[in-house]
Image (cartoon, grey):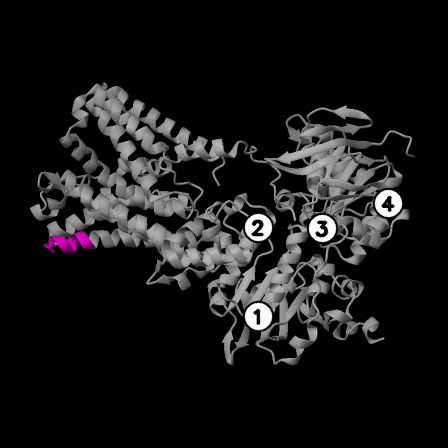
Amino acid sequence: MANETPLLATRNVIKRFGGVAALKGVSLTVEAGSVHGLLGENGAGKSTLVKIVAGLHNPTEGEVLLDGTPLGPVDVKAMERHGVFLVTQEPAIVNPLSVAENLMLGRWPRRGPLVDVRAMRRLATEYLEGTGLDPLAPAGRLSAVDRRKLNILRALHSGGRLIILDEPTTALTMADRRVLFDFMRKLKQDGVTFMFISHYNEEILEICDAVSVLRDGLLVAGNQPVAAVSSDALSEMVLGRGLALFARHDADRAKAEAPSWNFTGIKGRGFAVDRLALAPGEIVGFAGLPGSGAGEVARAIYGLLPAQGTVTHNGATKPLPAEPAAGLAAGIAFLSEDRLKDGIVGIHSIASNISLSSLGRMATGGVVWPGRERALVADFFKRLAIKARGAEQPVGQLSGGNQQKVLLSRLLATKPRLLILNEPTRGIDVGVKEEVHRLIDGLTREGVSVIIVTSDLDEMLRTVDRMVLFAGGRIVGDHPAGTLTKDDVLRIAFSTGGPDRVPPPGSARPALLQHPPKVLAS
Amino acid sequence: MSAHTDQIATAPATMAPPRRGRTAAQRLQGVLAHVVWIWLAGLIVIFGLLNPFFFSIPNLQNVLVQATVLGLLGLAQSLVLLVAEIDLSIAAVTGISSALGALLIQRTGVPVGVGVVLGIALATGIGFINGLCVTKLRMVSLIESLGMMITLQGGLLAITRGNTITDLPDSYYWIGQATIGGWPVMPVVLLAAFLLMGFTLRRTVLGRSLYATGGNAAAAFVAGIRVPQVKIIAFTLSGFISGIAGYLLAAWQMAITSNQGDGFLLYAIAAPIIGGVSVFGGRGGTLGILGGVLLLTVIHVGLAIVYVPSFYVTMIGGVLIFIAVAVDALRVNVLGEG
């Protein structure tokens, strides 16, 4: 194998954005007909590398070779002509169109200026035989895994030889993953090459032939056969040695105290929770697939999703907040999972982003006191060690980790008693991640309760006191974090139904899910 | 610890042009941030060289008077632009609100002050309705306010029957005509409005909420800003200021025509944008708006004074505005401000 010309090779690729190097000389090889895993922390340079291979970026230095031939500057269209396709996390499918129309999107068979519908259907039917996809079905009705299949097939139909899958298993159930992997194995036998990006070691070990690991813009392992590596070895390569991972050893302290937050009868569209209690200083992790209720309940508690229910805090019982402003007034603060979409105001300064939720606190009669605002901003700037030119720098120019610190500052400035954190460490690098966890840990010592919603189970299990597992809009498990393994969580919460088949609240749940899983009892 | 690595994770797929030579770019940015004032100074010098009368006190007074109505309408539009909406009805509001007030004074004999206040109240109400339509009914402000504009223009034509309203009591005209110590009173309103607006935008919770709403409405909402209410307030205040502009226009012209105010709309949109207010919301300041207003007024007055043949005035004015906007686009796009 090794003597053959690799399908894809990058030679000493360097990519700089402004003055910052995202890739610092990466030489990657991908053998034809293999599934090649690409592993690395967020920000390690995976997406940049993949975007260079797909033609979205051109390297600052170095070159990309296909079949041993160096490619000059290219764009996406050129790479697609070469047979390289990037299938992103959010499948680009036009929902109202049929599977057949999506398959040939933009390349429909023509009859003069018109689309030849009959020919399209005939061709699609032939092409999709044995894939389990119905060419006439509206694409919007497809399940998550079928949507991913359709995207892969579309790339192949357009002449794809190298398919890059960027975290294709996100939001898939265990069963769906298996279906996807079987599908990939079949295509591999037909000579298709895959690059497979994932955060999960076990997925890499299961489906990939070889793996490359990026850390901090450098290739720390290149084209290693997976047969020769263990999961632990992968983690070590990804994280680097010597990183002291934060782990919380505080579960018992919190349990001893009476709950400071009691939620009852939370009920909204697609979710229903009878009771949820949090002790002072307790960190509770919400785990579940998208649509399982984990994110929904967290948003409902803050007033971002309409829901019935009551909240009891400090002896007073009130209805759930109707809007975020009411949530804040009740002492709850909320971190969005998508910083850019509904987190930061990117064009505005660090200062105004930090003070945004506390304007009322710093004002008299609607007039903000500049001195109070400056003091507040300066305080958090120092406390969270925000790295920036100054408080007037627009937040959009900061790195992800510093943007997250600005958002956390905004939350903490409201002096919350309950923090709801969605993906608090998403897209920030390892060092800042640990800083964030230590910060949260520190807050709990002042009695602040914390809810963390994240899809990163490894991280959740080592940073929370208690895990609340969601599926189908309901709580299906509630266990001290120390008694659970990742496999338990995956089995309970992640294999009971994907977002496409969430049973409505009130429908019968399997009896197993009402109780701790057997593994725990034994 | 590498703050730079996670910058990559958030780097958008289509990269903005790389920023190099930050200090040079910053210096250029500093210059361009005040480009409207440089542009204004340049034009004043040119017009003054072409006709020295341009530098005279009476002409300065004329510029300020002419800038008052446009200035108020520029502020009214800016409030809405700041929250990433647009209001095409503000110019039509000036017409119908002043006409209604004037007709009440003429036909029902209500005191002048009451008529003026009722006119401004109508304008405020129209702004409020615009705000409700855009937030509660989720209508697109461009089309909603277009519909409102046409309705109001038609309404003005209907209540005036195509006639021009004149012969109002002298007290109605006072503010548009009076001078104190040889200086006209109108620009005082302009000055007061800009000071008040500047204070509101920079120092009040409302002002900060306006910016946040326009900068990223979803983020502002999550951060506890009542986004719909903020937008309704922006539209309502916009209507209120347009009402004041309507009264001033009538008092200054001493007449209300059946298409009063129509010519102001596009200039009232252009002035803030030239002054750095973004049509995408969340960006711009009072000083810039004032610069934009003065720039357009100077172009308008200057072209009249240097005896450009009247057939060319509109075209040249248009080209000058075009250049001003192009320079502003350069500032925002090429230098990637924010």
The kind of residue on which mark 2 rests is Asn
Dot 3 corresponds to which residue? A142
Looking at the picture, do discs 2 and 1 lie on one chain? yes
Question: Residue at the spot x=90%, y=47% of the render?
Answer: A228
Q: Using the numbered discs, state the Cα–Cα distance from disc 1 to disc 4 in whole angstroms.
A: 49 Å
Looking at the picture, do discs 3 and 1 lie on one chain? yes
Foreground: disc 1 or disc 4: 1
Upstream in the sequence, badge 3 or badge 1?
A: 3
How many neighbours does mark 1 have within 10 angstroms: few (below 14), some (14-19), or many (20 or more)? many
Question: Residue at the spot x=12%, y=47% of the render?
Answer: B172
Q: Tell me, for residue A448, which label it has, or none.
A: 1
Residue A48 in picture, x, y percent from top left = 68, 39
Q: Tell me, for residue A403, which label it has, or none.
A: none
Is residue A122 visible in this depiction of the protein? no
Dot 2 corresponds to which residue? A402
Work out whether residue A348 or residue A509 is closer to the camera in this orientation and state it: A348
* Residue B110 is one of the magenta-drawn residues: yes
Upstream in the sequence, badge 1 or badge 4?
A: 4
Work out whether residue B249 or residue A39 is closer to the camera in this orientation and state it: A39
Region rendered in magenta = B109-117
Q: Using the numbered discs, state the Cα–Cα distance from disc 2 to disc 3 in whole angstroms.
A: 38 Å
Q: Using the numbered discs, state the Cα–Cα distance from disc 2 to disc 1 in whole angstroms.
A: 23 Å
Q: Is residue A82 above or below residue B176?
A: above
Q: Tell me, for residue A185, which label it has, or none.
A: 4
The kind of residue on which mark 1 rests is Val
